[in-house]
Amino acid sequence: MHLSDLLNNLADIPDQAASTPIAGMSDNSRAIKPGDMFAALAGSSTDGRNYIEDAIKAGASAVLTDMRPLEASLDNLSIPIVMVENPRHVLARAAARFWGKQPGMIAAVTGTNGKTSTADFLRQLWTRATWQAASIGTLGVKGTDTRKMDGKILDLPKLTTPDSVSLHSALSPLCDAGVTHLALEASSHGLVQQRLDGLNVHIAAFTNLSQDHLDHHGDMESYFTAKSHLFMNLLMHAGAAIINIDDPYGRRLCDMLTIQGEARQIVIKTFGFADDADFQIENITPIDNILEMSIKHGGDSWHIPLAMSGTFQAVNALTAAIMAHMSGLTLQDSLGGLAYLKPAPGRMQTVTGHPKGAQIVVDFAHTPDALRAALEALRPEVSHKLYVLFGCGGDRDPSKRPLMGAIADQAADIVIITDDNPRSEDPANIRAAIMATSPKSIEIIPRDTAIKSTLEKLESGDVLLIAGKGHETVQLIGDETLPFSDISVASRYIADMTEAQK
């Protein structure tokens, strides 16, 4: 593909550069191959312009960057430099054009909590309908058969929403493998950085909005603006918006779309406990090891059994069902299929086998609202004591820490504070910030010792929530990435305890 074709209607290309061949693209100079276009993007900690010469040495055939004046050292380069107002948007559109293929149905879900479960549930519903489905998000790519991809493994970055080049380059082999339906997590970072621009989003869902990532966005208004980009700018003409109107930000988003949506013919479907929700949740009741959710829609009542823990998981499941219905699945198959869903890894996942019969649940809850929701969901299942074990991530929004400490102190009987992913911060300072608002908390480090010690204390009727890391298989301490899985550690110690009693 020539540069003029790649950036047609996206940028002004000098005549002498129009026929420059483009073999690929990247915003990482270390990934540049001969013939690639290098996108020199300004980031929060690094500036891609500092790596233009490295990209040229690697064989870059063109550079895409912003409109800032060029440094003197870049005045006489041997390759064309294309300058645009919004290089991230142009890169995403160019990536979509270069790789060309997208599944015919793309549904994206955004919100502070629930994205991973909702996307995974939607993929399961589609698969049950025998549609070729995949999901992309925190758990990577799921639902693909590598045999159909000639054994190719899609190695996406460890991000909730991949960068635009990784995303579009992954969609092509997915389509070649027969995938027709894609469920995608849309993070606020990904939306702000315009990683999803160029994607044909047919369905967009909003789960909730609560405090998280304020270290990146600054305030809740900016955070909401980032989330609303999915609906106001990316959702296609005549697309469908699925919105939780129990959340005040969801209600606000619904009002915004109602005004704008007429011209775009957007179909809005709302859900929640609110009386005016299109899909009204009447109640969610724990019964034995399942949840029973009762909802009203269009004058009909539905009673749906769910093999999972947590009221919020039932709401995530309903979100997925509405998305599935709006994608063409019958209402009967969409709602009826909820009974067959399995929780996503690390989302209210039960670790079985405790010798005294205690219940252990691992969940990714790492925000104040998510921690509160998980503890409140587990409280009805407790006949003795409710334990919670967690920490907070380093180099992330520090204002969450005292909030989560207070929530744990109020909602749990026993609070164990340990390390999460401290990254470059002093772990002791993170723990102290949490414990400052949790007088009943007990500090135990390292994390595996905290899990072992707590498991040994549990009695019949106790429930332990191990929160914060969920599906993760590593722990980030300083500049080290160490193998660590809450699920594996808990399972191993439970097995040791069981063996010791023989």
Image (cartoon, grey):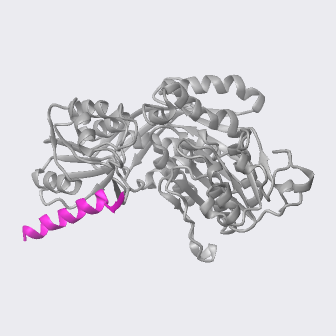
Residue drawn 63% across the image and 77% down it: 150
Asked whether residue 330 appears in the rendered view, the answer is: no
Q: Is residue 432 left or right of residue 68?
A: left
Q: Is residue 369 visible?
A: yes
Residue farthest along the front direction in this orientation:
72
Where, quadrant-wise, is the N terminus in this rendering? bottom right
Image point (66%, 27%), residue name: 257
State yes or no: residue 474 in magenta: no
Question: Residue 319: image x %, image y %?
Answer: 52, 41
- Up the image or down, 467 lies above or below 252; here it is below
Front-most of residues 40 and 362: 40
Which of the image's four quarters has the C terminus? bottom left
Q: Left or right of 192: which side holds 386?
A: left
Q: Where is residue 260? Give x, y as percent.
A: 71, 26
The quadrant in which residue 397 appears is top left
Indicate whether residue 489 is drawn in magenta. Answer: yes
Q: Residue furthest right?
A: 15
The region drawn magenta spans: 480-502
Q: Residue furthest left?
A: 501
